[in-house]
């Protein structure tokens, strides 16, 4: 059987709805039908959607489906349904009017069973209206049981549609959904300046200040900074040395305010129009807190 043009429809409609259970047959048969159509179209099959959403009675629904199917010269009519039997049955079965479609129905049944559903096999049904009244050969897929906990646990629209397309065409058409770009992982970047944060901790610990450790160069932090000159030793001197290096100097960070540190401070002051005394007082601190290069 050479398939090029296909009629496909979902069973029932919301006026005369199908079975219900763990999910709605009416809804899911439409979801599967839509997925199958888009997969077949991307494989270059001509596909007509013969679903009827307007029939007010079951007979009207069936007649409308058949009339839509017979409007097109299709090679096969495919009806998508889900089964139900008070929670007692489970698995896939495919119904056909005659064994003309045996190869296709068997393939579809097997492909769905590969997803884990019980393979209930292909059944010949000459009494079903849609199978009987459509011109082209017709098949009806009972994908699985919507009122079975086993089947509901296995069921997934995308894999069901893939199995049907695989059974029909021998091909699998994964529709790649465009994935939204992953949200950039927010870097926990605290506001403020890490060096100022360290300085604030040091001022609190060494000089008993009570600064908020926020890394922000506010007047409280500036006022808390002591005058530091040659001969000083410790964490605050070390921080001064680090800051000098970060704006372009290259002195050893040893926490000892020696000659080299003093020279560096003088150059730092000169470059910023400050008095070149080599002593880190309020004006020099102000520039250190800014931390900007020249
Ligand atoms: Zn049904």
Image (cartoon, rainbow, N blue to C red):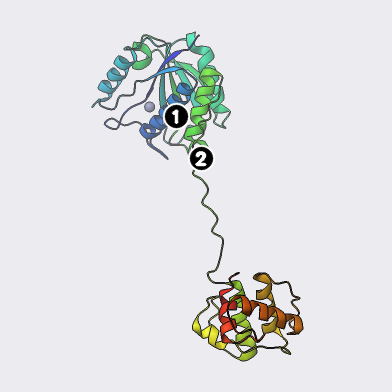
Q: Which residue sits at x=54%, y=13%?
A: 103
Label 2 residue SS = helix
Quadrant location of the C terminus? Answer: bottom right
Give residue 218's position: percent from left, percent from top.
50, 80
Q: Is residue 71 left or right of residue 158?
A: left
Q: Which residue sits at x=71%, y=81%?
A: 263
Q: Quadrant of residue 119?
A: top right
Q: Are marks 1 and 2 in contact (CB under 8 Å)?
A: no
Q: Which residue sits at x=41%, y=38%?
A: 23
Label 1 residue SS = helix
According to the image, label 1 marks what residue? 35
Of pointers 1 and 2, the one earlier in the residue sequence: 1
Give residue 132's position: percent from left, percent from top.
36, 12
Could you tell me if residue 210 is visible in this image? Answer: no
* Location of residue 283 with respect to 18 vertically, above or below: below
* Location of residue 271 with respect to 126 vertically, above or below: below
Label 2 CB less than 8 angstroms from ligand 1: no
- For the residues carrying marks 1 and 2, which lies nearer the camera in this image? 1
Q: Quadrant of residue 127?
A: top left
Give residue 74's position: percent from left, percent from top.
40, 11
According to the image, label 2 marks what residue? 153
Give residue 86's position: percent from left, percent from top.
41, 35
Query: Looking at the image, which residue sits at the far left?
Result: 56
Which of the four quarters of the rendered structure image does ligand 1 lie in?
A: top left
Q: Alpha-carbon distance for marks 1 and 2?
A: 19 Å
Label 1 CB less than 8 angstroms from ligand 1: no
Please state which of residues 68 and 128 is positioned toward the viewer in this rendering.
68
Within-10-Å neighbours for mark 2: few <14, some 14–19, many 20+? few
Q: Is residue 260 left or right of residue 210?
A: right
Could you tell me if residue 62 is visible in this image? Answer: yes
Q: Which residue sits at x=60%, y=72%?
A: 194
Please state which of residues 126 and 263 is positioned toward the viewer in this rendering.
263
């Amino acid at each position: 059987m050479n398939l090029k043009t296909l009629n496909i429809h979902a069973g029932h409609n919301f006026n005369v709805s199908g079975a219900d259970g763990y999910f709605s047959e009416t809804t899911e048969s439409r979801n599967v039908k839509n997925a199958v159509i888009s997969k077949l179209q991307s494989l270059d099959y001509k596909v007509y959607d013969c679903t009827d959403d307007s029939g007010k009675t079951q007979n009207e629904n069936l007649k409308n489906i058949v009339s839509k199917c017979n409007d097109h010269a299709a090679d096969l009519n495919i009806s998508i349904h889900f089964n139900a039997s008070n929670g007692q049955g489970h698995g896939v079965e495919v119904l056909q009017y005659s064994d003309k479609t045996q190869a296709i129905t068997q393939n579809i049944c097997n492909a769905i069973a590969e997803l884990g559903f019980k393979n209930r096999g292909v059944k010949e049904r000459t009494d079903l209206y849609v199978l009987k009244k459509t011109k082209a050969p017709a098949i009806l897929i009972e994908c699985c049981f919507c009122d079975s906990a086993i089947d509901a646990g296995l069921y997934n629209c995308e894999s069901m549609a893939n199995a049907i397309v695989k059974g029909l065409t021998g091909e699998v058409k994964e529709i790649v959904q465009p994935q939204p770009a992953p949200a950039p992982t927010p870097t926990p970047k605290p506001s403020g300046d890490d060096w100022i944060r360290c300085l604030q901790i040091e001022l609190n610990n060494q000089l008993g200040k009570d600064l908020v450790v926020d890394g922000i160069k506010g007047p409280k932090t500036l006022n808390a900074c002591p005058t530091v000159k040659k001969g000083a030793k410790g964490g605050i001197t070390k921080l001064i040395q680090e800051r000098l290096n970060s704006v372009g100097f290259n002195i050893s960070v040893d926490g000892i305010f020696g000659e080299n540190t003093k020279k560096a401070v003088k150059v730092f002051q000169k470059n910023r129009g400050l008095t070149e005394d080599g002593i880190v007082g309020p004006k020099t601190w102000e520039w250190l807190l800014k931390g900007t290069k020249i």
